[in-house]
Image (cartoon, rainbow, N blue to C red):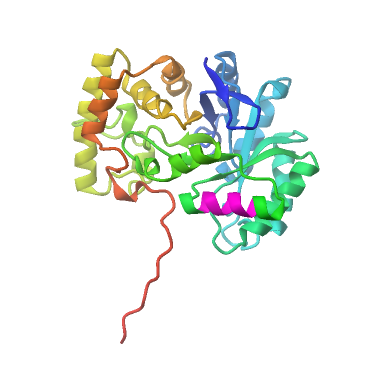
Amino acid sequence: MEYTPLGRTGMRVSRLCLGTMMFGAWGNPDHDECVRMVHRALDAGINFIDTADVYAFGESERILAKALKGRRDDVVLATKFGEAMDPDAPLRRGASRRWIIRAVEDSLRRLDTDHLDLYQLHRPDPGTDPDETLGALSDLVRQGKVRTIGSSALPAEGIVEAQWIAERRGHERFAVEQLAYSAFARHAENAALPTCGRYGLGVLVFSPLNGGWLTGKYRAGTALSPDSRAVRNADHFDHADAAIRATKTALVEEFAEIATEAGCTLPELALAFTLAHPNVTAAVIGPRTPAQLESQLAACEVKLPPETLRRLDALVPPGTDVNPADSPYPRPVLRREKAT
């Protein structure tokens, strides 16, 4: 396993980060198997684990508590807050001081730990002043409950604003950004990734396999498995849009051919692509099964030559998305109602 600095935090992390969104009711309800997957990842050299309070509404964090007993000190443990923990409870979400103070205590209890190595704002909260959010998170750092703080899916201007507010108000600054990035969804290359580089942020990449498309399981003539997320949530995974589905299916065949010529699997190609970007620290892998985990563990050993990267650029040009809807945080725009 390869290790690299997590931005300027002083922590060195594996270039693969184990994501646990699929642990629990959202993916794999077998707690014992999930625990074994965590142990397998740690034994393979992964020392970076990412979860969130909202993943199966706390179940993922509770599974991790079981898995990390006796091994907590060997792991950089990250979780996130901000997404709605109860759709009927408007105060149990967001980035207010009120919710952050409650949410961190809940996560610490579920994870059975006295501190978090990285605490991240899961999604931007336009209704909360960033000064309030950063102030509350800074207090958690000073109290020793959190070691460092980060954000996820902030647009470039949000990254800059947060850095500016932290400097002017004397707050802890976001040291890590987690963003969507894959060979099929390259919008981050336009502004977010360069901005992270400018500020020396550690960068975690989520959805590096583009919702399963770059695993190779969605191929022409291959029926979808009944338990696939593509069946349960077709709109989110591009299977409800015939044109996008056809485009991605054709691209998968070309990517698979490039992977074969490069001497690696398609998932390894996809993960190695994200790790090749100079501003990317680690790619988050989110396996549901042990087989999926095994298929991704060797990815950081794959180094793509410039010619292979140029071929991928020719298929999906830098800064573009195969599906424009792949941007995880649509920016708010002014919408005017038509006169009646």
In this picture, residue 104 sits left or right of residue 327: right
| Range shown magenta | 158-166
Q: Position of residue 161 (x, y in %)?
A: 56, 54
Figure label count? 0
| Rendered residue at 70%/55% (across/down) | 169
In this picture, residue 262 sits left or right of residue 166: left
| Rendered residue at 40%/37% (across/down) | 181
Q: Position of residue 299 (x, y in %)?
A: 42, 19
Q: Position of residue 274 (x, y in %)?
A: 40, 29
Let me know if residue 23 appears in the view.
Answer: yes
Quadrant of the image occupied by residue 208: top left
Q: Residue furthest right?
A: 143
Asked if the magenta segment contains residue 164, the reply would be yes
Overall secondary structure of the magenta section: helix
Asked if the magenta segment contains residue 270, the reply would be no
Let me know if residue 92 appears in the view.
Answer: no
Q: In the rendered view of the protein, which quadrant contains the C terminus?
A: bottom left
| Rendered residue at 21%/32% (across/down) | 314
Which residue is at the front of the view, 156 or 246? 156
Q: Position of residue 315 (x, y in %)?
A: 22, 33
Which residue is at the front of the view, 132 or 234? 132
